Image: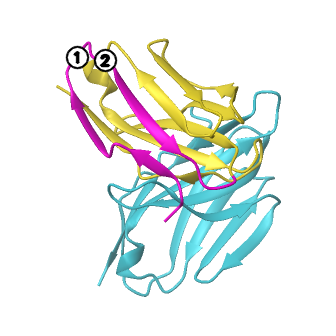
Chain colours: A yellow, B cyan
Amino acid sequence: DSGVTQTPKHLITATGQRVTLRCSPRSGDLSVYWYQQSLDQGLQFLIQYYNGEERAKGNILERFSAQQFPDLHSELNLSSLELGDSALYFCASSYGTDNQPQHFGDGTRLSIL
Amino acid sequence: QKEVEQDPGPLSVPEGAIVSLNCTYSNSAFQYFMWYRQYSRKGPELLMYTYSSGNKEDGRFTAQVDKSSKYISLFIRDSQPSDSATYLCAMISMDSSYKLIFGSGTRLLVRP
């Protein structure tokens, strides 16, 4: 058990809809990272928050947004969903940033019908 | 060309074999190297974390980094069926654009 909790485990929705994925980091970790994993793209970094502030941005679409709250949990919001957004979304956390190893949750599987 | 290259496999070996998993990379700014194991329907699990060139051992696992060749390896001794999973290498660059890049993963199957 990595200590990183993601909910829900599975989401099924339709095109055009909006969903929110939630992540609770390991106790004591200040950084939260979001990743998308699909069969053809592998594990792609989306965005990082450190202690409530956006720290780094990867290949995150404008339809996607995230935030980290004062209690350090994070939410990833996906809107105007398209079929191609179907993927596994992982959250990871680390104590600091830069060179710290990341620990992953078990992901949210998003299925767009 | 991808920054990190990893053979997707699958790699099938008999139980007890020594497994060698490898990644090559092109960006000399990569300074920290990790190996993750991912079981089906689970998140990646950190196995090894190294900084410098050389070897790091943890039980049946040995991570090797050769920065001069831009090549990293993970060796698994006495492989077990429970080692069957996808293994992802990952690297952190320390240039101005900090980022963690993953390889595409190698599927390993250890046959009983």
In what element is the residue under mark 2? loop
Q: Chain of mark 1?
A: A
- Give the residue displayed 62% in from the left and 40% down from the top: A71
Q: x and y percent of residue B78 in the render?
A: 49, 86
Q: Secondary structure at mark 1?
A: loop
- Of residues A41 and A82, the one nearer the viewer is A82
Quadrant of the drawing holding the C terminus of chain B: bottom left
Up-down: is A71 above or below A81? below
Q: Is residue A95 left or right of residue B94?
A: left
Does residue A8 show up magenta in the picture?
A: yes
**Residue A4, visible in the rendered structure:** yes
Provide the chain ID for the residue under circle 2: A
State the extent of the magenta-drawn residues as a range.
A1-28
Q: Which disc number belongs to residue A81?
A: 2
Farthest residue, direction front: A71
> Which residue is label 1 attached to?
A15
Residue at screen point 76% across, 46% down: A96
Q: Mark 2–mark 1 contact, CB under 8 Å?
A: yes
